[in-house]
Image (cartoon, helix red, strand yellow):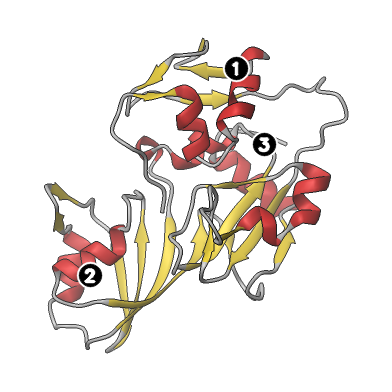
Amino acid sequence: MDSLPNYPIRINKYLAHKGYATRKSADELIHKQRVFINNKLAVLGDKVQEDDVVEVRTYKNDAKKKLVYFAYNKPRSVISHSAQNDEREIIEMVPELFEKYRVFPVGRLDKESHGLIILTNDGRITDRLLNPAKEHEKEYIVQTKLALRKNFKEHMERGVFIEGYTTKPATVRILNEHSFSIILNEGKKHQIRRMVAALFNEVSDLQRVRVQSIQLGTIPSGGYRKIEGDELATFLKALGLSN
């Protein structure tokens, strides 16, 4: 799940952490007057506050740029972006998409989690999908090491106090004594793992299976499929966009 350092944060670092671009290419976008903070054109050195709305805009007359969207099944042990040392990151796993379309992952899953991540070259959706104020749904299937307590569902749905913060209400469905599904509309760092730990258990497996209306479905680990047609139209409409 997505997280950022303490605010305020420089705009180029913000875009890099959101997975849109490297800091260098973020600076290029700012130079090209494509980045806006609260509907105001961003300049190099601007800082972003937590409640700011950041957009990277594309235009219909962009030369030969075709907006594309893919549902990707991130394997375990793969970094969403900004890999260190010998770590592998998503872009290295799908070089054909990066080379042809210059896609980037929207948001992240931690290294040992797996499942759905959206890959796109459409900078419009980054903040619209990740901004906590938008409250877009993400669904996960979680396995635990210990059996779930009887009041587990109640506590998870009501909100769990983790390190000075109470999580927002969630929707939980118990699948069996060691697994459950959860729908969140926020994405604190390692949120589900920390919530489960606060309730005296431990996550053994965590898979994201849905982002808004986009389902992981039967995509194999490391595989992807194109999001298009009615599925794409529904997804973009929920973000206030059109293709």
Q: Residue at x 32, y 52 (%)?
A: 189
Up the image or down, 122 lies above or below 226; here it is above
Quadrant where the N terminus sits is bottom left
Residue 30 on image: x %, y %: 60, 17
Label 2 neighbour load within 10 Å: few <14, some 14-19, many 20+: many
Contact (CB < 8 A) between labels 1 and 3?
A: no
Q: Quadrant of the C terminus?
A: top right
In this image, 65 relative to 233: left or right?
A: right
- The local secondary structure at tag 3 comes to loop
Q: Residue at x 23, y 50 (%)?
A: 168
Residue, disc 2: 196
Place of residue 56 in the rendered image (x, y in percent of width and height, measured from the top left): 59, 25
Q: Quote the CA–CA distance across marks 1 and 2.
A: 40 Å
| Mark 1 residue crowding within 10 angstroms, few (<14) / some (14–19) / many (20+) | some
Of pointers 1 and 2, the one earlier in the residue sequence: 1
Residue type of the residue flagged with mark 2 = Val
Asked if residue 114 lies left or right of residue 7, the reply is right
* Amino acid, disc 1: Ile
Closer to the eye: label 1 or 2: 1
As helix, strand or loop, the secondary structure at mark 2 comes to helix
Q: Which residue is mark 1?
A: 30
Query: Where in the figure is residue 124, as x and y percent of width and height?
Result: 60, 31
Residue type for callout 3: Asp
Depicted 10 relative to depicted 179: above or below: above
Instruction: Tell me what residue is drawn at x 28 percent, y 33 percent.
Output: 6
Quadrant in the rendering for residue 123: top right
Mark 3 to mark 2 CA distance (whole Å): 34 Å
Using a 10 Å C-alpha cutoff, classify the residue at mark 3 as few (fewer than 14 neighbours), some (14 to 19) or many (20 or more).
many
Element at label 1:
helix
Image quarter of residue 202? bottom left
Disc on the earlier residue, 1 or 3: 1
Q: Which residue is mark 3?
A: 122
